[in-house]
Amino acid sequence: QVQLVESGGGLVEAGGSLRLSCAASGTTFSIIAIGWYRQAPGKQRELVAAISSGGSTAYADSVKGRFTISRDNAKNTVSLQMNSLKPEDTAVYYCAARAATATRYDSWGQGTQVTVSS
């Protein structure tokens, strides 16, 4: 079992920055990828960024060039640096982990609210 805890959300003005962190515990050796999802009111949850155990990264087109995902293996944390934030980035952001034996992200954090004011 993997447990994930997000932190770092909050209220920021458009154009500002926030840094989200995801702390993983439990059977972290089984994780092959960690992703950041977000869900805005009335919208489907979408994958924003992901990073593999090997360090490969992927981003949604809507955040490319503005968001950066990184990992600290020693601390079992994954961060999402969000710059040039826009009101449309407002959502609950979730950290998710995918185990080697899974075909999808199967461990989820509780989410952290990000609100960008115009």
Image (cartoon, helix red, strand yellow):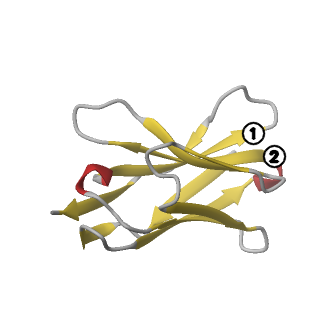
State which quarter of the image contains the N terminus: top right
Q: Position of residue 59 (x, y in %)?
A: 57, 47
Above or below — where is 31 with respect to 116?
Answer: above
Q: Residues within 10 Å of mark 1 (few under 14, many from 20)?
A: many
As shown in the figure, which amino acid type bears the numbered disc 1?
Ala
Q: CA distance from mark 2 to mark 1?
A: 5 Å
| Label disc, if present, on residue 30 of the rendered structure | 2
Quick check: 42 left or right of 46? left
Residue lying at the far front in this picture: please name it.
65
Sequence-first tag of 2 and 1: 2
Quick check: 12 left or right of 84? left
Q: Residue at x 38, y 73 (%)?
A: 17
Q: Position of residue 74 (x, y in %)?
A: 79, 74
Q: Nearer the viewer, residue 30 or 35?
A: 35
Above or below — where is 101 with respect to 24?
Answer: above
| Residue at numbered disc 1 | 99
Q: Is residue 33 visible?
A: yes
Residues marked 2 and 1 touching at CB (< 8 Å) = yes
